Image: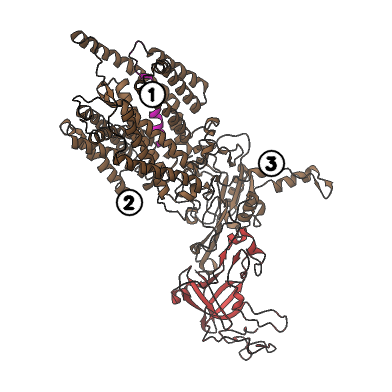
Amino acid sequence: MYEPVESPVENVLHPKVKHNPLLKYPRIKSHQPIGTVAEFPYVLMTSTVAEHWCGGSSTRNIPWLNELVPEPVLEMPESLAQKLEVKTGNWVKVSSARGELTVKAMVTPRMKPLLADGREVTVVWMPYNWGYRGLSTGPSVNHLTIDAVDPGAGTQETKACLVNVVKVHEPVPTVPRVKGRRS
Amino acid sequence: MMPPATATPIKTTLIDITNCIGCRACQVACKQWNDREGEQTQLDFNLGFQNPATLSAKTYTLITFHELPDDKAPGGLHYLFTMRRCLHCLEPACASACPTTALARQPDGPVVYDASKCIGCRYCIWACPWGVPTAEWDSLAPKIQKCTHCADRSDQPLPGVRNGQALTDEESKRYREQIVVPACVKACPADCLRFGTREDMLQEAHNRISAHPEKYVDHIYGEKEAGGTSVLYLSSVPFDKLGFPDVGTKSYPALSRLALHAVPPAVMALGAMLGGAYAFLKRRASAIVQEQAEKSRPDDHGHHAEFEPLQYKLLTPFNWMLVALMAFGAISLVARFALGLGGSTHLSNTYAWGLWIVFDLVWIAVAAGAFATAGLIYVFQRKDLYSMGRSAVLMGLLSYSFVTVTLIADLGLPWHFYQLGLQAPEQSAMFEVSWCVGLYVTILLIEFLPVPFERWGLQKAMDMWKRWSGAYVAFALTLFVYLLSRNLVYAALTAVLFSFLAWSFRARGKKAEPIMLAIAAVTLSTMHQSSLGSLFLLMPDKLGPQWWSPVIPVSFFLSSIAAGTALVIVVEMWIAKAWKRQPQITQLAAMGEITFWSLLVYLLFRLGDMLVRGQFGSAFSGRLGALFAAELLLGGILPLALLARLRLRAKQNALFIGALLAVLGVVFNRVNVVLLAMRLKGPMPQIAPETYSPTIFEWGISVGLIAATIFLFGLGARLMPLLPREQVGQGD
């Protein structure tokens, strides 16, 4: 059991071995920065939404599915929202050691801060189904995620990385747009 | 109320909310089967991932998301998903509202829509207590849209073969059971939706509740709601926590059915009463006249005044202003059809009706002066008011005609108007009003015709008029009664009654009285003035309790007499001032007395009704209470005080202000009923009501038509002998 490359905590199970010892990351030092918890204090979790498939290249071209989930959001716990003075629907800038994007915040009681290694770990979530082409476009979360891979299976570590979240007052040009059949 | 007995089993969907996983396959399957476009929205973040917020013409079915705090649930939250769609009432309010049966309930349950019959009046949107029907606001021909329970899936041909092999009967049956279900039921992967007969589904629901009383609340939403629906819900939490409205268990159409089924007998009763009153009063009046005649001049005209056209030039600055407003109105009318209803107005699924309906209701109420005056002069032999008759009738004719024009603008599909003649709705107040107003416009026109005939010396036409107007009345009322009752016995009785009256009161000699027209005017007006109130019988859930009442039709009728007679006073005094004529203060004061009594009766009736229904407790609290108090005080008590005593009434200022307040009070009442006192919640799930402020085009058409009325009235007074000849000869 190992911690991901970017993790806010030490490995509680195996304190001496934080990461997989066979892991090679960064593979190219100049292009694969690793964020620190001081700079990027929150954990970003990514996943799909049921209504879109993978990067959304097929599903985001179906107006009926775009209706169900028209845009990506950053889901965050109420405690973080309170700290950042963010309300549901506000724009936030999410940044990691690799990139940044702006997205609307969705503050929910569903997300709860975790207690790990004796400290509170705040997790935020964003779906990975958006991109720059299609009837509904939005920022791709893979601007933030890390491309470390499991040395055994080659699976990416896109499920977990470190990010920072700040409130911004206007969306930057990558506003998610929803287009569909004109009526 | 028991569901209507039907031979066919009622198709029913059972929705078990506890099974729903929120996948929204039903929402997409519904769009696919019904060929609805995807909505282009952004997330409403207060609703979580629910999208869109409400039903619309593009969305028949919607899953709403609910996060309820629950200590026992993991994370302290109970996540519930609820399917929102038409409940297909056993006695649907929307179908009972529809004047053309475009919305109708099939005997096997589904409430379906036929666009080819729809005139686009949008009454159904306001009639439904759940806010299910919606209109296509972005279309130039806005149809109504709603869930049809996939009634059209059952007539799709099923394949007889599979993989080249003919299906056995058993297979066909199984195939049919799996395919001929609503698209949403077909798509549901979680066994949240079940489809079958209402009996079976109710049984299933009861079984589930009794098998797991810890899991379900003991309430099947739809079993009794609004008289029962053919979509049933089971839930683990009380339904009000999920935003389901408490609509009561009474069927909505029951009240309007009662009011509308009273119309045909009322026409006959009223006609007979008016005929009787006339015969009696006429005999008494002619006895008096004879007495007087023996005393004095032999061929006295009674109180008949002489009329003459005005001798003013037409294009005064005021009239230029009216012309400008009319041009504005014409541009607005063009814009209305060029941009469509949604493009030119701020009407919405929440405010399906707006300024134009207020305008129609107000105008019809204040135009009641025409029938009240005609009734007073002829039926009740108040010959002292004769000098006001012609102007009152022209005012009525113009007002009603322009109400019709407004309706053409207001209807979404006005070119389907002929469907009103082809369809036979059972209990639609809108149908009653349409026919009644239409026929009354013809009566008003015929009432007014003698004036142009006299002006241009059309003696032959005049003779025709004398001979046939009575017969036309008998025809019109018979037609009306037949359309409303679809009962040949009623129609025959009406025909006999009014033919008899027409024959008894036929023109003898030179001086014919348009008594049949007056009777028709009073009868038809009584019916549609009250039916305009009946429109709101279907909205007890929306209209404030100070206004809504099962007897609102009577209130509407009584208030229209007060408003109509008061407006006659206001207009007569305005005419006198504008054209520097002597106001006929005796007649006007007499009219003021009539206004006083009708206003008093109206207010006593309304307050008495509130007292009986125990509505006084909170009648004056809150915003609605303030509106009610203002209406009562400024439009009721104040004018009553001003008009009560002859000493005050005979003073021009007091009479004018009293009459004006009486008119404005009723106007305010109609504004309240249509807009201010309505608690509109918008389309299902009634969480996002839109707001409303009329657009410039909505104002344009309304203001333009008011200007047209005033202008044409002035034109008429100049061209035709409309106003009585001045006694002293001034004003030339």
- Residue type at tag 1: Leu
Residue B87 percent location from the top left of the image:
55, 46
Which amino acid type corresponds to the residue marked 2 in the rendered image?
Answer: Arg
Q: Which numbered disc covers residue B449?
A: 1
The x, y position of residue B94, in whole percent, is: 51, 41
Element under disc 3: loop
Gap in angstroms between the C-alphas marked 2 and 1: 47 Å
Q: Is residue A98 above or below residue B377?
A: below
Above or below, B154 against A18 in this view is above
Which mark identifies residue B155? 3
The magenta segment is B508-533
Nearer the camera: disc 2 or disc 1? 1
Measured as percent of width and height from the top left, residue A40 is found at: 53, 83
Residue A46 sits above or below residue B336 on the image: below
Q: Is residue B120 toward the left or the right of residue B554 in the image? A: right
- Above or below B512: residue A129: below
- In percent of the image, x 84 and y 48: which residue is there? B164
Q: Which residue is mark 2?
A: B623
- Asked if residue B621 is among those painted magenta in the image, a careful observer would answer no
